Image (cartoon, rainbow, N blue to C red):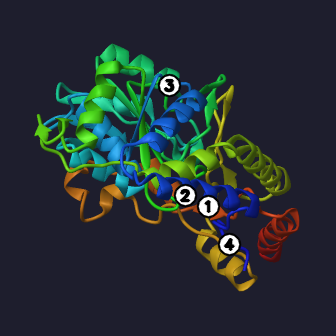
Amino acid sequence: MIPVTDLTTNPQILKKIRLAIDEVVKSNSYILSQQLEKFESEFGEFIGSKFICGVGSGTDSLTLSLKALGIGVGDKVLTVSFTSPFTIIAILEAGAIPVFCDIDPNGWTIDVAEASRKMDLKVKAIMPVHIYGNPCDMKKVLDFAKDAKIKVVEDACQANGAMIEEKLVGTFGDAGAFSFYPTKNLGAFGDGGAVTTNNKSVFAAVKILRHGGQTKRFWHVSAYPHSRLDEIQAAILRVKLSVLSDENTMREKIAARYRDKLSALKLRFQKIIPKAKSANHLFVIATKERDRLKKYLKQHGVGSDIHYPYPTYRQPAFKEFADERLDVTEEIQAKILSLPIYPSLKETDQDEVISQVKNFFVGKK
């Protein structure tokens, strides 16, 4: 079976990771120490952000970004349902209220016109999601946010390395949130995340919050469950960061090949805005035949998945915040299917995926 993703680590990279872990073990320092500081510096240089704060997960990076910006109880945050439910969980963890907006039918990211329609005096922030690594139209988002006088927190958890006009996502808003969950383009060997910002006061607030509200040892100015990126994960991420650009290039080639070879079929691709580049975290097609195609591919040795099978706003945990049906979200979510994509995907295996997708559609005629 050709998997949707493969977390097997390149032997040369794995050797470097083992050495990095050994270095941490020898240091007898496992929390908020040199490896984290070095990773934050290196990741900041890569992303192009003045301040980086490593935290425990991508969800926490979103929550802490909101809290550091003063978003809390009673405040509303504009976002999408077409995302991982953890985007919405992060808003709720901050004490805020999610406002579900529909998506653009081409790029599958937040429809800014829809967000504008749902604007009211309680809205304090907008959280665009760079879904599957595909950049939102940040010019539209930033122009809207400026006019509305609200904050911007980018959910870049799937978009490590995505860019618009040579500027990497996660650096456009007041804060950016990244995930280092193992399946991500830059994945740890466990959980992890980071907040990016060019605002010194936001950075300072996140640093205090991630350490349980401490400003000095055993002195807490606020109460928050700690969320820290540990030294071992930071050391692993430093090694993997060194090959991220190369691996993203491999993903880009795989995605381009899918688009080229499958372009004649009755399916849709996620469109990328002009002068932008996707991180290609996932390669997702849309077809009315999604469920039958998924079953067919499995029968023929090809893995696939649905990211995500259930509209978030209709799930029990979040449906109290749903005020109306999201037509585009419903349409796209019923059709999406993720095909295999990862840096080590062999061309012969991709050829097999392409062949089986073609066989399915040709066989229907």
Q: Report the residue that reaches farthest toward the bottom.
A: 299
In primary-sequence order, the first of circles 2 and 4 is 4
Contact flag, marks 4 and 1 (Cβ < 8 Å) = no
Which numbered disc covers residue 21?
A: 2
Q: Secondary structure at mark 2?
A: helix
Q: Secondary structure at mark 1?
A: helix
Q: Quadrant of residue 134?
A: top right
Residue 224: in sight, yes or no?
yes
Q: Residues under labels 3 and 1: Cα distance?
A: 29 Å
Name the residue carrying label 3. Answer: 49
Amino acid on which disc 3 is placed: Ser
> Which quadrant of the figure contains the C terminus?
bottom right
Residue 83: in sight, yes or no?
no
Name the residue carrying label 4. Answer: 3
Q: Residues under labels 4 and 3: Cα distance?
A: 34 Å
Contact flag, marks 3 and 2 (Cβ < 8 Å) = no
In primary-sequence order, the first of circles 4 and 1 is 4
Contact flag, marks 4 and 3 (Cβ < 8 Å) = no
Which residue shows up at 20% across the image and 45% down it? 212
Q: Residues under labels 1 and 2: Cα distance?
A: 5 Å
Amino acid on which disc 1 is placed: Arg
